[in-house]
Amino acid sequence: VQAGRRIDLPIGRSRAARQRMSTRASRPRAAITEIVRAESLDGLTLTGVMIFTGRTHQIRVHMAHARYPLIGDPLYSGRAKLPPGAAGPLKEILREFPRQALHARKLSFVHPVSGETLTFQADLPDDLLMLLDYLREDSETMR
């Protein structure tokens, strides 16, 4: 994954599995995601993305389409898919991570009634901080 990559693929309900969204839907709507930051972590990549549309599962669908599925996302990547070379404790940690490794650090939108731009920010939660620390430490160990 490279910072600056723009994924401009429409998203709609999957024809094959109604609970999933897809870039090959029969009635897709515009969806644009831009990768603004990328940090390589030995077979994994920490990415920062900006979305220009707000489609259901947009980040998950676009990243899976680009072959960069999220850790802990069984719907679009399957929990069993691990990076090449993942072994020992890392393999177990990734396999057992209990949720999608996805976090909205900052959300902004225009209030539909007042027209005011509202912005909300949230720090990375403890479980993601611990996962990231482990991945960075493991990445350093592998070098």
Image: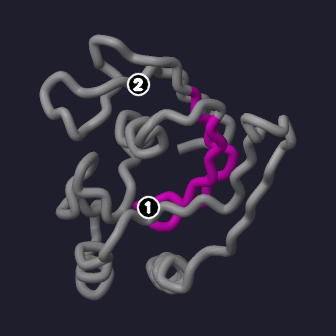
**On residue 126, which mark appears?**
none
Residue lying at 50% horizontally and 77% vertically, measured from the top left = 128
Q: Is residue 31 visible?
A: yes
On screen, 5 above or below 23?
below
In the picture, measured across the screen, residue 48 lies left or right of residue 45, that is right
In the picture, measured across the screen, residue 11 lies left or right of residue 26, that is right
Question: Magenta stretch containing residue 92, yes or no?
Answer: no
Where does residue 55 sit, x and y in percent of width and height? 49, 34
Residue lying at 18% horizontally and 63% vertically, measured from the top left = 80
Q: Secondary structure at mark 2?
A: loop
Task: Rate crowding at label 2 as few (under 14), some (14 to 19) or many (20 or more) other CA atoms within 10 Å.
Answer: many
Question: Magenta stretch containing residue 48, yes or no?
Answer: yes
- Cα distance in 3D space between marks 1 and 2: 25 Å
Q: Main secondary structure of the magenta part?
A: strand
Amino acid at pointer 2: Ile
Q: Which residue is mark 1?
A: 44
Task: Rate crowding at label 1 as few (under 14), some (14 to 19) or many (20 or more) other CA atoms within 10 Å.
Answer: some
Residue lying at 69% horizontally and 70% vertically, measured from the top left = 122
Nearest-to-viewer mark from 1 and 2: 2
Residue lying at 34% horizontally and 12% vertically, measured from the top left = 27
Where does residue 52 sit, x and y in percent of width and height? 65, 32
On screen, 106 above or below 110?
below
Q: Which residue is mark 2?
A: 11
Amino acid at pointer 1: Leu
What's drawn in magenta, residue-wise? 32-51
Q: Is residue 143 visible?
A: no
Of residues 97 and 18, the one drawn nearer to the viewer in this rendering: 18
Of residues 69 and 2, the one drawn nearer to the viewer in this rendering: 69
